[in-house]
Amino acid sequence: MDSAAKGPIADSFLRNNSMRFPKLARRSFLKLGGAAAATSLLSVNGQDALAQDAAGPKPPDVATVMDPSAIAVENWTEPWIWRPTEWPDQSLELNVVENQNPGPSPSPGNRFPALFSYGGTSPAPTIRLRGDSRLRIRLRNLLGMNHGVTPAGPAPDPAELTPPLAKELLCHAAKADGLPCSDTPPPTSTVLDHADDAYQVVKARVLRSYTITDGSNGAHSTRVTNLHTHGLHVEPLVNADGTFGDNVFLRLLPKGDYEARRKDAAPNPPRMGADERVGAVDFSYQLGDVLRGQSRTRKLPPQPQPPGTHWYHPHSHGSTHDQVSSGMAGFLIIEGDVDEAINRTLTGEAHPDPTEKTGLYDYRERHVLIQRVEVQTTDSEARPGPRGRGQRFPPPLAVNGSRPPAVICMRPGAVERWRVLNGSVDGRGFQRFMVLEGQYVQDEEGVQLWRVETEPPSPSAPSTAAPAEQTPKRRLAAMSRRRIEEAKRNLYQLSSDGVTLVTVENGKARHTIKDLSKRNAGSENPFARPPKQGEHPWRAELRNFEDCFRDGESIRNAFVRPNEVYLANANRADVFFKTPLDSAGKIYTLLAQEDLIHTDNYQQRLQRGIYRGRPQFNPAPIDVVLAYVHVLGAPVEGGDFDVMSLVDKLPPVPPFLQPIGDDELRVTAQEARARKIPEGSFRTRVIGYSGYVSADFPLLEAPQEFVKAHPELENLVWTRFDGGLVLLPPASRTMAINSRFDLALHSDPTPPRKFSHHDSEIVRVAVDTAEEWVLYNSSGMLWGHMDTAKHRQPGQFNGHYTSYPLSRAEGQARFAKDSEFQITSKGADHPFHIHINPSWVMRIEAPDEKGNLHNILDAPRWMDTIPIPRNGGRVVLRIRFADFTGRWVNHCHILQHEDHGMMQTVECVDRLDQSNYNPRTRIASHQATSEEVSAIYPRPSLEIQYKQNLMFVDVDHATGLAWPGFEVKPPKLAD
Ligand SMILES: [Cu+2]
């Protein structure tokens, strides 16, 4: 293979084609572009090319932009509400169905075709109930059967084959269709369209999806489902009456899978996994009596689950991404004392209709679902082609999804409570929710936010002019990040992940509300600085991005912004918005801004752009305009309401939400005897999240001895290419979790593990105890040479380069000297989610460019999904395993990571000798410096992180393997 197959050529092909083909095809063209574009080798003199680039983003046609003030009646709509009390003795019936017209986006910003839904409604019905009542749901799987295959044991990712293997695959596919084999890929055919054939070409062992009896790792069994109540504190497995609780091990099969198994097994009964059912299952969630263990000892009366904004969605390992991204998600609201206090103050009633404007301030609630999805499935079941049930992906949708933003009408002075849920599922789903004054729109490509401005009618126009000429002319003005900062308006935050904010004053916990205009007020966002004189905009963007990570102050100013709520995937926030009394006629925009500093994508894209002098395939930031507020009518009767006055009306913090103090972590005398550990020490645990998606895989050489010893793994784990022996990125990615990551105990930790029903190495906690957990994220950036002619890398293919773990500062300094040295692999912030019990989060620590950690959490708070910053970032939290025994999970809420194995069983046991925490004499605190915390919980080195990211063990009997089968070592960078 000559150098024509290398990255720049493929990128050029991709750039030329990227707007004509659906997003889904783009990555595949990256693999196939070599042959097609071999004649157009560009000069890669970044500087010169960059200077020639002049064209900025084009605004959309102003005539196509809607005018919210022209809409007479509010058109904001929400799913219908199910209240168990209104339907005594009935279950909410959720029928999982194939959507008749997959394609129309289920929610703003969702580019993913809606394959499935609960009865055709996306988002799903909103459930509202009190914290001491029972919710019953009947879930019915009406989907068709799973026809596809899943690799078992070693197999490469079909999307990341070397060019010769990719060509062989397309030939194979062409022959199967009776077509001649050609060097030019057909325009609609991509490697991923033939994922199943790929396993034949490389001779991987595969399982037919319908035969799989428990969740193995990788996207598979797209038509198996179950249900998770995200945020509920309920029975995790099975209730005494046989109904299910919040059980995500359950696999509810479609009837077709069962029938196929029956045919295979006839005359014997078909094989069913222990957690499998077919057709329909009943769930019953009995809320209330939280802390029952402590109720006994402390004689507390039964406690309801505290009120809050939660949600439900499917959670079947292997299909979670495909189903949730289809729009299968609904709000699950627990109502209680907090709501009554707020409602009474604002409306005079404890239980007004939450969706009707009530009282002197037109007070009401809204359920705001953000779902921004960009990535594609890897399960052939959900893809087009012969086995994909004829479903075709639609052409690229407009950035805002298939429907224009809704218009909310409010009177001046009105107060509303918005329950905001980030239902995004992918690695670029991190969002900042804000309200901007004015109307904002996006262009088709989502590159730029534009403000709609009106030019007043010209005073010289004669008064007899036609009415059309008298209406104000609209024009679009490009918005810089700084102007967006200036346009943000006041928000007041009531809760985080559904839990009403708790603050500690003079040693006493109380509920509170945060005036977000005061948070880090007056600070300068490094990311929003204007370009310097004569500076190219891309260089300014890159400098600003780098500035965000300079030191602790920069990190704080970039991550902690006034008047916005940062939401990782699955996070919720309840906020109050009030229109000013003098705002009649104004328009406000509800914006979910893609958070760019929570991934390395944008920085890599800018580096590639500067190097090659043209924009790159890696998509631009995609912000989602959720809705507009049009203020009209007379001011509300109540006048100017002081939102912060609600603080004094909030009820006391219940025992369930009391902060977890140091003493609760202490090992009791009884436990000390049972575990033979020191009494009075603290229960602690360190867990590592690590891994890369296939596109971010570095070029890894397979050692000669390994190749010699394992010829049977050719084209499955390693392959020959371009004079090198290279590793192929594995089909199930390297995403995994390590529960033996306490470096004080194991200085050279064993590889992390993927999820398995059968793994004995799981987290075991004792019921009615609390533990301190430290989470490290090893997924991190790698750097390398892009100029493969100057820096020969035998076996280099697609986007895989020899890559070095360097600090951000060192990598950036090298890039500044010569832009061919760049980020070659991107890390990911992993949103850690644990079921059943919320976490008292004390620290979220992001590394600066030198690797020093800085806590970005202003004060401890309750959360259930916590992003662990990449590049060795850290989270410190405490969990009270209040009362339920049984099994549940912790996992990454980037749902493809979860489907690929970034999930782990947590078992809560009632025998003290069975817990497996590590006792410690010292623990962390919110006030401690990061260095002090590191002294207690040692940090992984770059070398340990590198190894954790590129090795894993999967003990599943179906997909199991230890990858790659030898110890990887980071390469050394020659100076
Ligand atoms: Cu993740």
Image (cartoon, grey):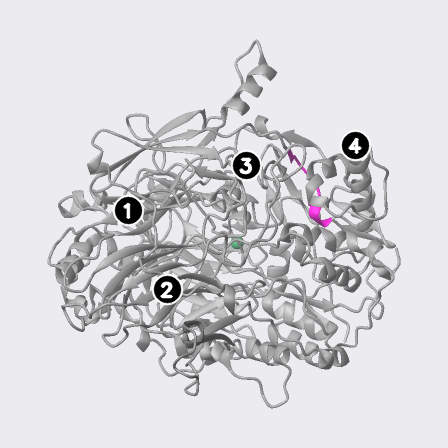
Label of residue 70 in the image: 2
Q: Which amino acid, by three-letter code, is at mark 1?
A: Ala
Whether 531 is drawn above or below 677: the answer is below
Tell me which numbered mark, 2 or 3, is placed earlier along the sequence.
Answer: 2
Tell me which numbered mark, 2 or 4, is placed earlier along the sequence.
Answer: 2
Nearer the observer, disc 1 or disc 2?
A: 2
Where residue 697 appears, x then y in whole percent? 68, 56
Q: CA distance from mark 4 to mark 3?
A: 25 Å
Circle 2 packing at 10 Å, graded few (<14), some (14-19), many (20+), is few
Where residue 542 appears, x then y in whole percent? 60, 76
Whether 929 is drawn above or below 2: the answer is below
Tell me which numbered mark, 1 or 2, is placed earlier along the sequence.
Answer: 2
Which residue does the image show at 55% across and 27% down from the upper left? 145
Q: Quadrant of the C terminus?
A: bottom right
Circle 3 packing at 10 Å, graded few (<14), some (14-19), many (20+), is many
Residue nearest the viewer, comparing 409 with 365: 409
Q: Secondary structure at mark 3?
A: loop
Q: Which amino acid, by three-letter code, is at mark 4?
A: Ala
Tell me which numbered mark, 4 or 3, is placed earlier along the sequence.
Answer: 4
Q: Quadrant of the N terminus?
A: bottom right
To which residue does mark 3 refer?
222
Could you tell me if the residues under marks 1 and 3 are in contact, i.e. CB atoms within 8 Å? no
Within the magenta stretch, is there residue 158? yes
Q: Is residue 826 left or right of residue 592?
A: right
Q: Secondary structure at mark 4?
A: helix
Label of residue 176 in the image: 4
To which residue does mark 1 refer?
882
Circle 4 packing at 10 Å, graded few (<14), some (14-19), many (20+), is few
Q: CA distance from mark 1 to mark 3?
A: 34 Å
Whether 453 is drawn above or below 242: the answer is below
Q: Is residue 682 left or right of residue 170?
A: left
Circle 1 packing at 10 Å, graded few (<14), some (14-19), many (20+), is many
